[in-house]
C-alpha cells in the first residue's frame, strides 16, 4: 500500500526522486498521467493496465466517456524508474500540474500523486477543515 507525504526537489532535467518506501512497490516502470484536482497520478504498470481496462469498458458513444479517456490516455507517459529511484516528468505534465522546483509526493493507497507544493498545502488545509463532515458522509456508506 502506498501511503505517506514527502517533499522532494525536481532537478533541472525534470527528474523527481520517488520516496524509497514507494520504490519497492512501484517497480522499474511507471505510468504518469494527468490527475484530478491539479495533480499528477503515478501508477504501477499493472495498476495502469487495470485502469485502462476499466476505462475501455466505458461507452465511446457517450461524450463524457470519450472526453475523460482522451484526457487520461493522451496525457499518459510510461517512464523508467532509474537506478537511484527518479522518474522523468515531461514538460507538458510539469506545466499541467504547475510544478516548480519542489513537489509533494503522496501515497494514496494504489497510486502516487505529485502536487505543486503550494497547491497541496491549500488543498490539504481545505480537506482538514471538512474532515469530520467527510468522515460522517463516508461512514454512512460503510467505509469507516
Image: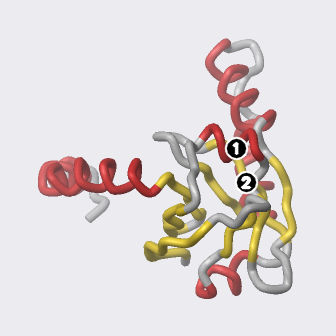
Asked whether, in this view, residue 102 is left or right of residue 56, the answer is left
Q: Position of residue 124 (x, y in %)?
A: 30, 55
Image quadrant in which you'd find residue 78: bottom right
Q: Position of residue 25 (x, y in %)?
A: 68, 81
Asked whether, in this view, residue 100 is left or right of residue 4, the answer is right
Q: Residues within 10 Å of mark 2 (few under 14, many from 20)?
A: many
The residue that disc 2 covers is 32
Say whether marks 2 and 1 touch (CB < 8 Å).
yes
Q: Quadrant of the N terminus?
A: bottom right
Q: Position of residue 121 (x, y in %)?
A: 33, 56
* Closer mark to the observer between disc 2 and disc 1: 1
Position of residue 65 relative to residue 100, above or below, is: above
Q: CA distance from mark 2 to mark 1?
A: 8 Å
Position of residue 49 relative to residue 10, above or below, is: above
Which element carries disc 2, helix, strand or loop? strand
At x 85% / y 85%, what residue is drawn? 83
Asked whether, in this view, residue 3 is left or right of residue 65, the answer is left
The residue that disc 1 covers is 93
Q: Position of residue 88 (x, y in %)?
A: 79, 61
Q: Observer-nearest residue: 102 or 72?
A: 102
Amino acid at each position: 500500500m502506498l501511503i505517506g507525504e514527502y517533499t522532494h526537489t525536481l532537478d533541472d532535467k525534470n527528474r523527481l526522486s520517488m520516496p524509497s518506501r514507494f520504490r519497492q512497490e512501484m517497480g522499474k516502470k511507471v505510468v504518469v498521467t494527468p490527475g484530478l484536482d491539479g495533480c499528477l497520478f503515478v501508477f504501477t504498470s499493472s495498476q495502469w493496465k487495470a485502469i485502462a481496462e476499466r476505462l475501455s469498458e466505458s461507452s465511446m458513444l457517450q461524450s463524457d466517456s470519450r472526453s475523460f479517456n482522451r484526457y487520461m490516455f493522451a496525457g499518459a507517459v510510461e517512464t523508467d524508474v532509474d537506478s537511484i529511484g527518479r522518474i522523468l516528468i515531461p514538460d507538458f505534465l510539469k506545466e499541467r500540474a504547475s510544478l516548480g522546483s519542489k513537489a509533494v509526493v503522496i501515497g494514496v493507497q494504489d497510486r502516487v500523486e505529485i502536487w505543486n507544493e503550494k497547491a497541496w498545502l491549500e488543498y490539504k488545509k481545505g480537506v482538514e477543515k471538512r474532515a469530520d463532515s467527510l468522515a460522517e458522509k463516508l461512514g454512512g456508506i460503510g467505509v469507516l
